[in-house]
Amino acid sequence: MTKAPLELVNADARRIFLHTHGLDQPPEAHNGDTLKAIHGLGFVQVDSIQTVARAHHHILHSRIGGYAPAHLARLHADDKTIFEHWTHDASVIPMAFYPHWKMRFARARAKVKTGEWWASRLGSKRILKRVRDRIAVEGPLSARAFDDPGTTGEMWGWSRSKTALEVLWHTGELAIARRDGFAKVYDLAERVIPGEFRDAKPSKAETVDWACTYALERLGFATPREIANFWALIPFEDVERWVERNKKRLVRVRIGGTDGKHTEALALPGIEALRDAAPPPPALMRALNPFDPAIRDRKRLKRLFGFDYTIEIFVPEAKRKFGYYVYPLLDGDRLVGRVDAKADRADNVLAVRKLWTEPGVTADAGFKDRRSAALADLARIGGVPKVRLTK
């Protein structure tokens, strides 16, 4: 690592960050390559909430002009160029990254073997064989194909067969072949994952190096903890050792925050070239999904953008400050407001229940025009033609 850290003023840090997160150009300027967009982000979180549109579709729509949900389904079920598994949460991930998930599979298998983790939910591991054998004979099945009396008592109310399906998925024996609506359809991994990726056997050192390097590429700069949290794939201690081994080539950077404070972080060689090449953000406003990767790390978000954000879906209604599912508004390189909106399918409109403007933001005519355009785009994401402002 260089002796003196490279100074990145806050404006440059935001510009690099938005560039690495695919928010440095209008969606219509994107070439429409959904796989390339997922590869650039590293993964896209999958979530069932559909206040306007499901998170994975909204995240991709925010970056790709003309994106449609069918694009993602084709990459998954037909082209087999993405797979679905776990990062910090359920996500779609480029198939080329699959070999490195074997480290996660191995950890899950170890927990099943020792009886940790799933044993209390399954009752007996024999159900794993019954579920696996049925899929081997019948082909891809969803949890609905299994008729179980009662549930495991877990918060999701899963049946034991559903729990077994999830265990087999986490251990890599099953894979998600496709989604029917939002229901997972499971199949044997060898019938879903192409052989070249299924047969690859990277060493632990190769996976650690891949995870750290690819995380830094997608973040631009990061602390060791942020590197570990990116994929949630390798332990923090492995990141620390990787940093120590690579200290001569890594670049120390000092990131300026909106509050004038600085954060020490790391970057790959070429960070200065990236700083110089990253374009200024477009002069447009867009509503970001609460699960967008650019806002996932709330502490980093506050440091870089001065934006204090909490998704309040698990906060009791009486204690919510803003609302159940509130969308941050990104205007150029600033987070300038929030919107509480829901697609009203019965009236075929985007019902905007409340708008907030961040302190210090001037809501002039230009701001209001850009916000109106952002709301119209959010309506398009939800498949409704009009915006209705609730008085």
Image (cartoon, helix red, strand yellow):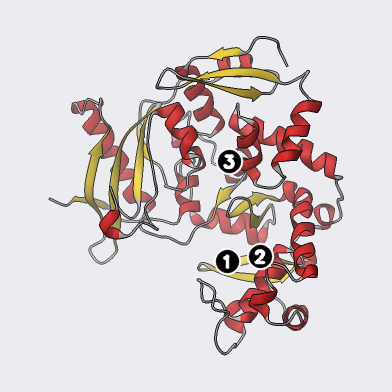
Left or right of 14, for residue 143: right
Q: Give the answer, above or below, for where 120 lies relative to 70.
A: below
| C-alpha gap between disc 1 and disc 3 | 20 Å
Sequence order check: which comes first, mark 2 or mark 3? 3
Nearer mark to the viewer, of 2 and 3 = 2
- How far from the left and from the top, in percent, is residue 152? 58, 79
Q: Residues within 10 Å of mark 2 (few under 14, many from 20)?
A: many
Element carrying mark 2: strand
Q: Can residue 141 be seen in this snapshot? A: no
| C-alpha gap between disc 2 and disc 1 | 8 Å
Residue 277 position by quadrant: top right
Q: Can residue 178 be seen in this snapshot? A: yes
Q: Give the answer, above or below, for where 215 lies relative to 121.
A: above
Element carrying mark 3: helix
| C-alpha gap between disc 2 and disc 3 | 21 Å
Element carrying mark 1: strand
Q: Which mark is residue 176?
A: 2
- How far from the left and from the top, in percent, is residue 61? 46, 46
Sequence order check: which comes first, mark 1 or mark 3? 3
Q: Which mark is residue 37?
A: 3
Which amino acid type corresponds to the residue marked 1 in the rendered image?
Arg
Given contact means CB atoms under 8 Å apart, are the residues at marks 2 and 1 in contact?
yes
Marker count (numbered)? 3
- How far from the left and from the top, in percent, is residue 366? 23, 26
Which amino acid type corresponds to the residue marked 3 in the rendered image?
Ala
Left or right of 114, for residue 278: left
For image coordinates 79% across by 42% down, the residue present is: 207
Q: Which mark is residue 179?
A: 1
Left or right of 281, for residue 109: right
Q: Which mark is residue 194?
A: none
For image coordinates 64% across by 80% down, the residue present is: 161
> 55 and 166: which one is in front?
166
